[in-house]
Image: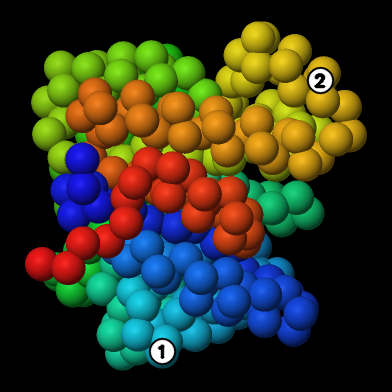
């Protein structure tokens, strides 16, 4: 397995502080050594991090790396969303991650969430094929989905609307991914589905976040992590080994690449990629 056969991408969240922004620049420079296809930057669903996302994305793109902004309507007007996408296009950005997002607390009410398939349709109508479009998917099924089959059908709707590929929510059970891929294929989905990998760095935060987003922490894993208590160094080391094994299993069984949720840190992602031997090869 060589680096050139698999697509590697790294995800950041935008920082609000100058220190965080400087750190992100360093992390991005360090992770650039692995020649990722792109760095994506998440988008706060309601205003607070929107300009931070744009600034982070434009910084990455200006550095010569490929940036992929995450994007959702989140209550904005079509004109505003179009203007933002145009700005991205003018900056040379070639890829977007199109999402519905969640309504931030305190908004709700009159605002209506725009489903990701509608955003994909909007981008294709307004910008034709100017962008590669990624969408999100959920091997353990989105928490609001009415059923397993329903969630797959809506993923198909996003891809049929013109998205090029999907990136998964994180998971720790590879069978959930393989079963999901099988079910997607049966539903007629033939576009690549890239596993999203979250190296474990902090159990308490992970447990809280997983509950909200519907990602399962298997019982054996929860028990193992509880044993480490507040020993964050041991959790980190364990998390790196676990993610390395997970990635190995995924790649050996046909996953087309990896999308690493970096949490704006170099070490876990860099060590996993090194462990996997995914060092860029000159062609
Ligand atoms: P959709 O695909 O629109 O689906 C949302 C729900 O509605 C699902 O339950 C689905 O089954 C159902 N559904 C879909 N389409 C329809 C339809 N047309 N009619 C009726 N029901 C439908 N959140 C952020 O706020 N910012 C980010 O940057 C961000 N990045 C992410 C990146 C990845 C790779 C992933 C996996 C998630 C990310 N999220 C992010 C979280 C995401 O915004 C939430 O999970 C959100 O609740 C759903 O977004 P979606 O694009 O998957 O929604």
Q: In which quarter of the image is the C terminus?
A: bottom left
- Residue 225 horizontal/vertical position (percent): 75, 23
As displayed, is residue 99 above or below residue 80?
Answer: above
Q: In this view, does 246 lie to the left or right of 19?
A: left
Please report the residue visible at 58 percent of the width from the left and 49 percent of the height from the top: 268
Determine if the C-beta at disc 1 is less than 8 A from ligand 1: no
Question: In terms of image quadrants, where is residue 174?
Answer: top left
Q: Is residue 208 left or right of residue 212?
A: right
Residue 136 visible in the current orientation = no
As displayed, is residue 59 above or below residue 168?
Answer: below
Which numbered tag is attached to residue 226? Answer: 2
Residue 247 visible in the current orientation = yes
From the viewer's side, name the closer residue of 110 and 107: 107
Q: Is label 2 in a helix, a strand or a loop?
A: helix
Q: Is label 1 in a helix, a strand or a loop?
A: helix
Q: How far apart in space, not on screen, are marks 1 and 2 (Cα)? A: 43 Å
From the viewer's side, name the closer residue of 262 and 2: 2
As displayed, is residue 108 above or below residue 232?
Answer: below
- Residue 182 horizontal/vertical position (percent): 22, 17
Please report the residue visible at 72 percent of the width from the left and 16 percent of the height from the top: 224
Label 1, on which residue? Answer: 62
Which numbered tag is attached to residue 238? Answer: none
Q: In which quarter of the image is the N terminus?
A: top left
Mark 2 nearby-residue class (10 Å; few <14, some 14–19, many ≥20): some
Q: Looking at the image, tell me whether mark 1 or mark 2 is earlier in sequence order.
A: 1
Mark 1 nearby-residue class (10 Å; few <14, some 14–19, many ≥20): some
Q: Is residue 81 left or right of residue 158?
A: right
- Residue 280 horizontal/vertical position (percent): 27, 61
């Amino acid at each position: 397995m060589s680096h050139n056969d698999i697509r590697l991408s790294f995800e950041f969240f935008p920082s609000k502080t100058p220190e965080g922004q400087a750190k992100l620049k360093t992390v991005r420079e360090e992770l650039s050594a692995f020649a990722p296809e792109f760095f994506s930057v998440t988008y706060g669903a309601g205003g607070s991090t929107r300009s931070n996302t744009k600034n982070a994305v434009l910084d990455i793109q200006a550095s010569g790396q490929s940036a992929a902004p995450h994007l959702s309507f989140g209550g904005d007007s079509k004109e505003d969303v179009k203007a933002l996408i145009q700005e991205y296009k003018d900056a040379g950005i070639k890829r977007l991650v199109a999402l519905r997002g969640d309504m931030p607390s305190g908004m709700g009410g009159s605002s209506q969430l725009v489903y990701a398939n509608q955003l994909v349709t909007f981008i294709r109508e307004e910008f034709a094929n100017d962008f590669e479009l990624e969408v999100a998917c959920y091997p353990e099924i989105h928490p609001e989905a009415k059923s397993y089959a329903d969630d797959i059908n809506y993923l198909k709707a996003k891809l049929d609307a013109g998205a090029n590929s999907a990136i998964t929510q994180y998971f720790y059970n590879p069978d959930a991914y393989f079963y999901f891929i099988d079910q997607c294929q049966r539903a007629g989905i033939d576009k690549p589905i890239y596993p999203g990998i979250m190296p474990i760095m902090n159990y308490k935060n992970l447990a809280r976040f997983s509950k909200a987003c519907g990602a399962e922490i298997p019982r054996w894993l929860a028990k193992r992590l509880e044993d480490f208590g507040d020993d964050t160094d041991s959790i980190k080391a364990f998390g790196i080994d676990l993610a390395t094994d997970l990635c190995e299993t995924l790649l050996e069984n046909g996953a087309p690449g990896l999308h690493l949720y970096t949490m704006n840190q170099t070490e876990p992602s860099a060590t996993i990629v090194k462990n996997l031997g995914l060092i860029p090869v000159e062609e």
